[in-house]
Amino acid sequence: MEEYPLTVQSRSVVRVRVPAKINLHLGVGPLRDDNFHDLATVFHAVSLSDELTLEPGPPGVRLILDEPAVDLSAEGAPTDGIRTDGVPTDARNLAVRALYALADAAKVEPAVTIRLRKGIPVAGGMAGGSADAAAALVAGDALWNLATPAERLHTIAADLGSDVPFALHGGDALGTGRGERLTPLTHPYRRHWVLAVAGKGLSTPAVYAETDRLRGTDADASDPAAVIKALDDPDPAALADALCNDLQAATLSLRPELADVLTAGTAAGALAGIVSGSGPTCAFLAVDADHSAQIADRLRAAAVPGVSAVLVAHGSVDGARLTVED
Ligand code: ATP
């Protein structure tokens, strides 16, 4: 068995907050030989977050799932609708996998306990599991005093999942390859969103498979240029016109009632609505913060079947960041 050197743990607890993402553009290209699709996507990190706390524990990596909390939704909306019953607490959890991967790369013997509080809908198309993997990498790096170079952390993140590198970086970024190759997109504008969270999640592989069934496996990805241009426009109406998701048809095919959610959002005054990633969360663009609060109130009052929570968020925000270290 390989011997690990002893590590100095000068910190006793670290806490990381990590955002959800929506895809302002999700262009899905041909199915590759490795079974991933080539993507051309514009990621946008939003102010709905998970919180991961890491502290020394018994040998191995243990995960305790805490109750979702109100304050993880940036605007303080209740997160009662966030169900955590589908989240594994064993080695299938992406945060646990991330810590084993980091420990392995750094030759550290892991002996830690993770406490995870979800504010990001589970299986909601907002990359919550990937966010937790990114949070675990940042937390493990801090707890173990590794000072891992950013490029190295990015490589470990990409091995864990296509959306993990973006959760490390946050902001807005063009993602190519299977989404792991990032080009930051900088602009000064804050965007305001209303998120309609579904009570029941959707499987991402099932949505990709349905996309392949509907349009074949060699369709080209739609072009993200319009969204990239609209990000530089102060008028949110330009972004509303450009939003695009190549997975949306498949998501609606698997979950036809989402069409009613999208209709309800625009009837409530949103500039536009789009399915977030592989769904079923629907994201609605508002003009400003007051407008998003107004849309959310109307959408809650509409009590659309299948919608378990209506949340307000803004973007873009930073990626996984330390909030506490002792
Ligand atoms: P995608 O990144 O594919 O868009 P998603 O946002 O739709 O994913 P996630 O919340 O990441 O969905 O979870 C998908 C599945 O991954 C869950 O149903 C659960 O079984 C598993 N999972 C593993 N780790 C986690 C985690 N830390 N949080 C949530 N789900 C996790």
Image (spheres, grey):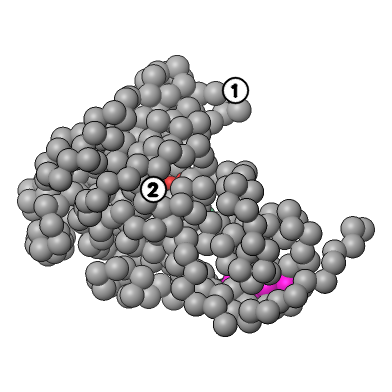
Q: Position of 223 compared to 88: left or right?
A: left
Q: From what the image shows, is residue 239 above or below residue 73? A: above
Q: Residue at x 29, y 68 (%)?
A: 74
| SS at circle 2 | loop
- Closer-to-camera residue (298/173): 173
Q: Amino acid at mark 1?
A: Asp
- List x then y, in percent, for residue 265: 14, 50
- List x then y, in percent, for residue 16: 49, 69
Which stretch did the figure color magenta? 111-115
For label 2, being within 8 Å of ligand 1 is answered yes
Q: Amino acid at mark 2?
A: Gly
- List x then y, in percent, for residue 166: 46, 48
Q: Is residue 12 visible?
A: yes
Q: Is residue 176 highlighted in magenta?
A: no
Crowding at label 2, few (<14), some or many (≥20) Cα neighbours within 10 Å? many
- List x then y, in percent, for residue 197: 29, 57
Q: Is residue 256 visible?
A: no
Q: Position of 281 compared to 40: left or right?
A: left
Which numbered disc, 2 or 1, marks the residue that appears first in the sequence?
Answer: 1
Q: Mark number for residue 33?
A: 1
Numbered marks: total: 2
- Closer-to-camera residue (121/109): 109
Q: Quadrant of residue 18?
A: bottom left
Q: Is residue 113 highlighted in magenta?
A: yes
